[in-house]
Structure formats: structure tokens, C-alpha cells
Amino acid sequence: MIKKFRLGNPFNTEAVVSEIKLSGLKSFPLTLSEGEKTVIKFSLDNDDMIFGLGETVRGINKRGWIYESWCSDETNHTEDKRSLYGAHNFIVVNGGEKFGLFVDFPSKIEWDLGYRNPDEAVIEIYGKDADIYYISGESEIDIVKQFRKIIGKSYIPPLWAFGYQQSCWGYAKQEDFVNVRENHKKNNLPLDCIYMDIDYMERFKDFTVNKELFPDFKAFVDEMKENNIHLIPIIDAGVKKEKGYFVYEEGHEKGYFCTDKDGNEFECGVWPGIVGLPDFLNKDARRWFGSKYKALTDMGIDGFWNDMNEPAIFYSVNGLEKAFKKLDEIKSKEVDIWGFFESKNAVLGVQNSMEDYSSFYHNADGKKICHKDVHNIYGAFMTKAAGEYFEEEFGKEQKLIFSRASYIGAHRTSGIWFGDNFSWWEHILLNLKMLPSVNMCGFLYCGADLGGFNNHATRDLLLRWLALGVFTPLMRNHRALGTRAQEAYQFGDCKDFADVLAVRYRLIPYIYSTFRRCSENGDMMFKPLAFEYPEDKVAREVEDQLMLGEECMIAPVYEQNKSGRNVYLPEDMTFVKLSGENVTKKEMKKGLHYVEISLNEVPLFIKNGKNIKLSKPALNTAKLDTENLENLL
Ligand code: MIG
């Protein structure tokens, strides 16, 4: 049962698509107090667990930490953080009474889930206008399904987007892309997509292609397609302010950029230099920006990733000026150690500052709204602009589109990736933990940068990470500029990589059909064990294994120098190891086990009485035979 409560006059975030009649606030089942902030409280019993919040740090059970809904360009996904790129305001509490809570509110929310007081959850909504949904149900998954029903079905990308994908910030020349393609082919490594990061553009200008690097871009895209490779360019939120640049000039003329308090275009610095931020909250501006993707779809491009759309602001023109003034001030006195810290903070504080987010405005249907009050839907609306345009222009399931920033609702037209992680072992585990949380919020097409974005990957780390990635809908290897090359062919003998990647292609029919089913009926692809075995005390607390679909459990190796791992079986299962075309099977009893897993093997556990179907491996999805499948068991 879903009850909807309205406070004030909330902004329409478009998260919920069903009409739900309002209940009186008097019947709100938790403690709620109104004021400058709206505060919801409920007490927590010893055994209560809390799931959800989508893309965040820490555990599958979110209890015991404090989180913030505030879309952030946060490149350090360590456990001291409170928010990452998405704002996914949905939790499920499994206590004596099980319930779900969705706070539909586009600005900041603080979720103290037993942090200040271990026995209490305190949710502070930074405003007076919000829709709050309270969902009661029989089980965690029942509550999730009710929620997913009211937010609408999840986006489904084309089948080829389930192939293996290679990315790197640094590919620039045509030759770079051809090399990636040929090296995969030569080494028997499958591949479906190669990503184009910001360097393909003309000085980082959206919807342009550098002519020196790509003299005939369309011909190049075609040539790649003939080789069954899709090129996936990046689009950034900020539009370079430059005379003669068509995107800027059109947007400027129509008044489609965010403005400062006086109505002048707000100016900030990101990769292209000084940019205007398109006003994605303005319907016309949104449609206009969406239609700009045509410049690239006309060239044969059929997939995109949207970046920097929290929005990330390196500096605002005003903010930088202020910081310089501050430095001058400090310099004019005798600089001591405190002066040093003050200088440092003045400069660092320029990036992604609350002061900047509070100083520009949107024009939403004629209403002037301060950005900070709607911050969390900016990136979602950018990506929705593209997704809606693609559906109108090309039909459903034709284009790949995913975003860095997101809010619930964007899951209907796009996927997400988990942003700038590190080539750290602990980030394999973080990748796993995020999967069920984002699934709860509707985001099914998702994945992390496999091998890690920042820092330097090692052979064993990449192999272990890929053995988790074979299960995630988005399976993309991506890294940052200046880090160690991490394509699968960069670590000597490629055989182990070929074995792991072959497993992905063998699993695509299963992953794809599970994905479609979950989109259709609001199910999660990945569930915590606690959802399926609520009475099993050990299963409830498992944080490094997940249930996949209705048939499987996954338990990847995520530690260095380990030739196996401990795994808990909540029921009798068949332990399967997949490697290339090889499959080894072993029946195992419920309970704790140690299993050995080599670097070229993908472990998978199949529930008693269940089975899944596999295809033959292929070097890309175009060559994948999805008709003639064989039973795994
Ligand atoms: O400031 O486009 O998360 O995937 O490679 C960094 C360069 C901007 C951040 C994205 C990352 C991408 C990078 N971008």
C-alpha cells in the first residue's frame, strides 16, 4: 500500500508517473516536524536494516552512517564521503514493520541512519515543499516493486550495449580507436563499443568533432560499424561561450542558459573554458538541447554518455575573482601558517561551491528558481532531454544513453555509470554493493569503471574486476588520463582475459532476458541475500555476495593475492566455474565454504532446481547466436 503526503507546493521532479491520491498529514505513520527544514524520525530496533539510497558509499545495509542527497562531482569514493553523483531518495526499512520511504525533493536531504544516535533514523529535508511516499508491504521486494510501479519502467538499451566496452580518457586520434579494435580482434578478445572521451571534440565543444583528428567522421563511424564496433562519444553539460559556435549562439539567442540574479548568463569554467549551463529545467531549452544530439546521430553515432552534469563547476568567474582577492589580502599581511591554510582553502573552495550553486537561476515554466533548490534534478533532466529525443526520433531501445548525475525518474530513459572510482581492490566490492541499491531505485542499466578510473590497475585486479563485470549490464573498462594502460591486451598473455570475456558473451542471453524481465515487472536484477533469506541471520548480513535474477548467486573474488574466497550458501546450490567454453560444476550444501577460483574463472552459484541458458561465445554481439542456447546444468 502506498500513501502519498504533500508538504507545501513541491516542484514537479517527474520521478513518479502514477496518480496517487493525497493522504492527510495527520495519518503520516512516522514522526514528522515542519519548519525551515522538514524532519522525519523513526526509531531503529537492534535487528533493523536499511537498504537503498542508490549510488552511495558504504554497505548494502546503509545503517550506521550519514548520507546526503546532493549530486556531487566526487572523485574520491572513500567511506568518509556522504554523497556521490546521484540523488536516489528511496530506502526500505526491514524492522518489525517493513516499509519503504521515498522523499521526492530536488534539493539537499540528510539521511542520518543511526549515525548520531544508533537507535534512531533522522531524515532532514532542506525545505518545506516535498512529496513523501510511505510504502508498506509484505517483503522488501514487494515494497520495491510497488515503488518501481509508480516510477515507471526502466530504460532498455539496444542489445549491443550488453557487449564488452572499452574506454579511456586519452584516446584521441583515429589510429587510437583502430588500435583498440585491432588489438582486441588479434587477441581473441570480444568487443562491441569504444568510447570517445572529451578529446574527440573541437576544444571540448559539445556536438562538434575535431576535423584534424577526424577528416571524415561519418566515414570513420561507418568503418567502425562495418567492424561491429559502436563509437560512443561523451557529451558534457557546459556549453562553451564562444562567438560563432552554433550551440552557444542558438542557446544564447533563445535565453536557454542559466542566469545570475541580475539575469545575465551565469559563467563558469569547465573543460572548454568559460561555459554557459543549459537550463535543463526549462522545457524548451531541454527539447532544444536534446535535438542537438542529431549532429552526431546524423554521422551514424548511436550511443552517448553524459558527463559533468551534477553540474560540476571547476570555478565560477565570480568565485575565482573572490579567491584571488582573498589571496591578495593574505599576501598583504605577513603570511603565517594560518595564512597558508587560509590561502589553500580559498583556492580549493572555488570548486563545486555551495556559494555558486546558490547564485544562479533557472526558468522553469516561467518561474525563476534558484539552482540550489533544484540541484539534484539538473543532470537527470539533461539526460532525459537526450533520452526523450531519441525515443521520439528513433523509437525505443534504439540508442544507448547513460549519465553520471541522476535522480529517480531518469531511469526511464537512460542508465548511469558510477563515476570516478579508483583501481583499488576495495572498489570492486563497492561496485558490488551499489548494484542492489541502484536497482531498487529503477536504475538497471548501470556499471562501474572496470579496472578502476583513477590510479594504476594491475593484471590481477582487472581480471577479478571483469569477473564481476561480466554480470553488470554496462560492462565497460575505463580509466583516467595518465594512468597505466588497462585494455585487456596490455598485460602480456591475453588468454586469461579472453576466457573471462568469453563468459560475458555466453551469459548475454541470460543477462539480457533477466534485464528485460526486471524492467517489465519492476524487479531487481541484483538483490541483497537479506531480501531472499530474511530469516537466515548469516545471509542477512552478507555484504559481498548478491542474488542475481531468480536463479543465481554471485560471489566474486575482490581481494589481492587470493586464489579463492569464503562464500555462504543460504541453501543447497550448484557451484559453477565458467572459463572460456569450459564449465566445471559441483553440488554444495547450505552453509559456509571456501572455494578456489583462478584468475581466468568466473564463479557462479545456481539455486537448487534452477538452471540458466548459455550461448556460444562470440567476438561481438552481432555475431552472437542468441537462438541456439544450451543449458548450463
Ligand atoms: O573532470 O571527460 O567521470 O569518466 O573520463 C573529469 C574526462 C571529466 C569525468 C568522468 C570520466 C571522464 C572524465 N570526466
Image (tube, helix red, strand yellow):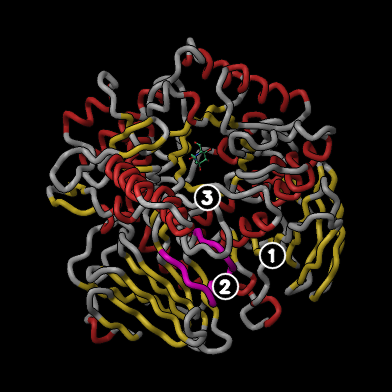
> Is residue 405 found inside the magenta-colored segment of the image?
no
Q: Earlier in the sequence, mark 1 or mark 3?
A: 3
Residue at label 2? 61
Q: Do residues under tags 1 and 2 come within 8 Å of each other at their CB atoms?
A: no
Q: Amino acid at mark 2?
A: Asn
Residue at label 1? 545
Q: Secondary structure at mark 3?
A: loop
Location of residue 11 in the rendering, given as x and y in whole percent from the top left corner: 22, 60
Does residue 558 appear left or right of residue 86 in this picture? right
Quadrant assignment for the C terminus: bottom right
Q: Amino acid at mark 3?
A: Thr
Q: Is residue 212 visible?
A: yes
Of 569 and 486, nearer the camera is 486
Give the Cα distance between marks 1 and 3. 25 Å
Does residue 377 appear left or right of residue 453 in this picture? left
Q: Residues within 10 Å of mark 3 (few under 14, many from 20)?
A: some
